[in-house]
Image (cartoon, helix red, strand yellow):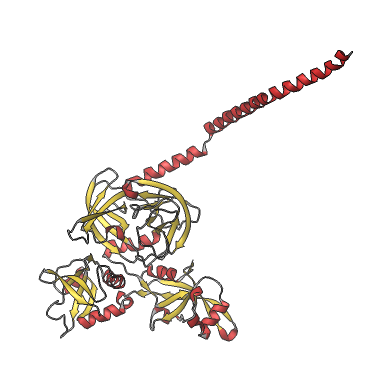
């Protein structure tokens, strides 16, 4: 009886042992079968429609569209070393039109004595500088070559999140491509070598050597030009390695500059006549002024407050006042003072722009938004560099202007790129040394192609001490006789 009593318990125990032994294996078999089924199903879906394959093909198509227009640049110029070594500067560029015009960054070719361009076919040809705009860091070159493929272009402003592709030669890995998205637009990075900043911020990898290369959209259209790597406020161009923040000049600014450089060799920029600063930077000394104190207390948004209006300027004639807060220009928000300079500086003289302003009205205890149309005048570089211009006039440079064929013909001198000395003050130190008709072709060893180039180089040199000193500047001048000589001109 005892054996019969134990027999059912034994059966249960054996069953439990078998379950414990066999269940993991069964579970593994079931799991494996499920994984195999999922793989088969995934392969079936991929064979019917593979989104990743479509994305892969689209990226390859972008590369095929863009690659023929991308160039690798090597610019050689004298170093500051005692042995006069020639140092190459590598960068990128892209074909602008079938006439051989090439667009790149100014800092890639600035000061170069020789520029070589490698096409996507491997062919290397020499390039000539057509023009360079220091304030926007844009340069135009020209090459003689057959069967060129210009880049497709679009001035559509990208939107945050748009996919983009950066092309160029990072670290001299030529004809490279990287992908990313637009992180932001309208960025100002406080770069010391660019005056007009309105960058597209991207996270596509951009490194030294990418400068001047195209930034494209998903259709292979150039929407910007790789220019800088943000490594902190006040960073200079081309410094450091990629850290997730790349900056590109948008296409609308490129078109504005390039078309003028090709047509006339210099860029005419708009002038409104206002000086501004960010609303948030109103300082304690200004707070003693009731108007600025009212602005600080009643305006709590981004904007640029007008601190000076030049008499008889376009802004003055339009009715803008000190204390007006510029909210936007032509619908573009002016989040800071740099944005105002960038927008106005990339509009042509004679163009009318719409200022949306917030006007403080302390007597009514509030402010009022209104729109003011301003017809821009031509920016005079001598006004921006008034101190230096006054010193040059005292020395004897009575009238300076960008050298053009017509201006040179009027003085019966051969035309060349530079700044034409149209008149010399009688009885000055300059008289008898540098006659009218002379052309300033370089400042501190750096070539100049316009009056703006000339005053920008003088201003930057005097501020930084590079190549120039606070006491004097070395001007390379072509005299009417054809002789080219260096002249040490005092700047004090």
Of residues 347 and 178, the one nearer the viewer is 178
Residue at image position (41%, 45%) is 62
199 up-or-down from 6: above or below: below
448 up-or-down from 224: above or below: below
Residue at image position (44%, 39%) is 57
- Taking the image as shown, residue 345 lies to the left or right of residue 448, namely right
Residue at image position (20%, 73%) is 420
User: Which quadrant is the N terminus positioned in?
Assistant: top right
Q: Quadrant of residue 19?
A: top right
Q: Quadrant of residue 107?
A: bottom left
User: Which quadrant is the C terminus positioned in?
Assistant: bottom left
Residue sitting at the far front: 2
Of residues 163 and 205, the one nearer the viewer is 205
Estimate the x, y position of residue 269 in percent, counting from the top left: 34, 70
Estimate the x, y position of residue 199 in percent, counting from the top left: 42, 61
Estimate the x, y position of residue 380 in percent, counting from the top left: 31, 75
- Taking the image as shown, residue 440 lies to the left or right of residue 380, namely left
């Amino acid at each position: 009886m005892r054996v019969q009593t134990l027999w059912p318990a034994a059966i249960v125990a054996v069953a439990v042992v078998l379950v414990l032994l066999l269940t993991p294996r069964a579970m593994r078999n079931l799991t494996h079968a499920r994984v195999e089924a999922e793989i088969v199903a995934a392969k079936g879906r991929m064979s019917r429609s593979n989104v990743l394959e479509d994305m892969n093909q689209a990226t390859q198509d972008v590369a095929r569209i863009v690659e023929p227009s991308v160039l690798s640049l090597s610019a050689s110029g004298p170093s500051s070393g005692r042995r006069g070594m020639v140092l190459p500067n590598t960068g990128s560029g892209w074909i602008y039109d079938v006439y051989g015009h090439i667009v790149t960054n100014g800092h890639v070719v600035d000061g170069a004595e020789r520029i070589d361009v490698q096409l996507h076919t491997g062919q290397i040809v020499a390039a000539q500088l057509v023009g360079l705009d220091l304030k926007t860091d844009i340069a135009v070159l020209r090459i003689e070559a057959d069967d060129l493929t210009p880049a497709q272009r679009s001035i559509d402003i990208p939107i945050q999140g748009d996919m983009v592709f950066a092309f160029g030669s990072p670290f001299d890995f030529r004809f490279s491509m990287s992908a990313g998205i637009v992180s932001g637009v309208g960025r100002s990075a406080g770069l010391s070598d660019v005056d007009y900043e309105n960058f597209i911020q991207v996270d596509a990898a951009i490194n030294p050597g990418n400068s001047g290369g195209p930034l494209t959209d998903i259709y292979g259209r150039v929407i910007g030009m790789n220019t800088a790597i943000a490594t902190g406020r006040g960073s200079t161009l081309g410094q450091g390695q990629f850290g997730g923040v790349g900056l590109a000049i948008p296409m609308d600014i490129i078109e504005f500059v390039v078309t003028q450089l090709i047509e006339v060799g210099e860029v005419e920029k708009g002038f409104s006549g206002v000086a501004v600063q960010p609303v948030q930077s109103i300082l304690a000394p200004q707070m003693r002024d009731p108007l600025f104190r009212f602005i600080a207390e009643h305006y709590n948004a981004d904007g640029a407050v007008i601190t000076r209006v030049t008499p008889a300027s376009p802004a003055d004639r339009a009715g803008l006042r000190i204390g007006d807060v510029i909210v936007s220009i032509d619908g573009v928000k002016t989040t800071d003072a740099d944005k105002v300079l960038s927008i106005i500086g990339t509009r042509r003289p004679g163009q009318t722009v719409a200022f949306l302003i917030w006007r403080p009205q302390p007597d009514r205890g509030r402010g009022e938004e209104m729109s003011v149309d301003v017809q821009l005048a031509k920016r005079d570089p001598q006004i921006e560099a008034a101190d230096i211009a006054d010193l040059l006039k005292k020395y004897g440079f009575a009238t300076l202007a960008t050298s053009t064929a017509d201006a040179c013909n009027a003085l019966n001198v051969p035309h060349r790129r530079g700044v034409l000395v149209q008149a010399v003050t009688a009885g000055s130190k300059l008289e008898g040394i540098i006659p009218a008709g002379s052309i300033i072709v370089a400042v501190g060893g750096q070539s100049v192609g316009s009056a703006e180039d000339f005053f920008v180089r003088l201003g930057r040199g005097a501020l930084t001490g590079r190549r120039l000193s606070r006491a004097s500047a070395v001007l390379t001048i072509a005299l009417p006789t054809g002789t080219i000589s260096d002249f040490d001109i005092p700047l004090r």
